[in-house]
């Protein structure tokens, strides 16, 4: 069975954590969900995206080592999955930043400016 990148959708949940920027869920064929993909802060820029992030497949800690529990053996497909997660993360982050800008409270100066508008 071959998986085409078009068969995969991504949902992003932004987090307010020091290390974990977001969690991603991959949805395959609209029936299979893989939770716990992560977008993490990194000390080095991502070699493809150039941002200081690291995309991690679902994993568990065994002693001092993290072991992935999801494997994508097809390297080009894995890179495409990373791209999908990165693009979904960027869209969600940008949307969140835009909405938070809209929801900022008006200051007294803003109200004065509004009062000065002549109609």
Image (cartoon, grey):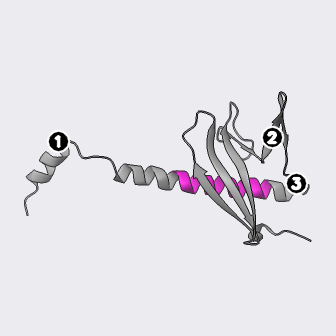
Which residue bears the numbered disc 2? 60
Whole-percent x, y for residue 3 in the image? 85, 68
Q: Residue 114, position in %: x, y?
A: 14, 53
Report the magenta residues as a range: 79-93
Q: Is residue 107 left or right of 56 when viewed as pictured?
A: left
> Which of the two marks, 3 or 1, is nearer to us in this view?
1
| Cα gap from disc 3 to disc 1, whole angstroms | 55 Å
Q: Residue at x 83, y 59 (%)?
A: 77
Q: Which mark is residue 75?
A: 3
Does any portion of residue 45 appear in the rendered image?
yes
Crowd tier of the residue under label 1, counting other residues whose Cα lies within 10 Å: few below 14, some 14–19, many 20 or above: few
Secondary element at image label 3: helix
Compare marks 2 and 1 and give the one earlier in the sequence. 2
Residue 83 sits inside the magenta stretch: yes
Above or below, 1 relative to 34: below
- Which disc number belongs to residue 52? none
Gap in angstroms between the C-alphas marked 2 and 3: 22 Å
Q: Is disc 2 in contact with disc 3, using a CB cutoff of under 8 Å?
A: no
Q: Which residue is mark 1?
A: 108
In the rendered structure, which disc, 3 or 1, sits on the residue that comes first in sequence? 3
Q: Residue at x 64, y 41 (%)?
A: 51
Q: Secondary structure at mark 2?
A: strand
Q: Are the residues tagged 3 and 1 within 8 Å (C-beta)?
A: no
Figure disc tally: 3
Q: Is residue 94 above or below residue 3?
A: above
Residue toward you, 24 or 82: 24
Q: Name the image quarter holding residue 17.
A: top right
């Amino acid at each position: 069975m071959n998986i085409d990148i078009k068969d995969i959708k991504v949902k992003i949940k932004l987090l307010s954590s020091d290390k974990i920027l977001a969690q991603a869920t991959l949805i395959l064929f609209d029936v299979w969900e893989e939770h716990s993909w992560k977008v993490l802060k990194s000390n080095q820029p991502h070699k493809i995206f150039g941002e200081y992030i690291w995309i991690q497949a679902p994993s568990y800690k065994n002693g001092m080592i993290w072991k992935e529990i999801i494997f994508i053996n097809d390297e080009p497909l894995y890179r495409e999955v990373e791209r999908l997660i990165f693009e979904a993360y960027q869209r969600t982050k940008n949307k969140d930043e835009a909405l938070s800008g809209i929801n900022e409270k008006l200051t007294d100066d803003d109200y004065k400016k509004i009062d000065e508008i002549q109609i």
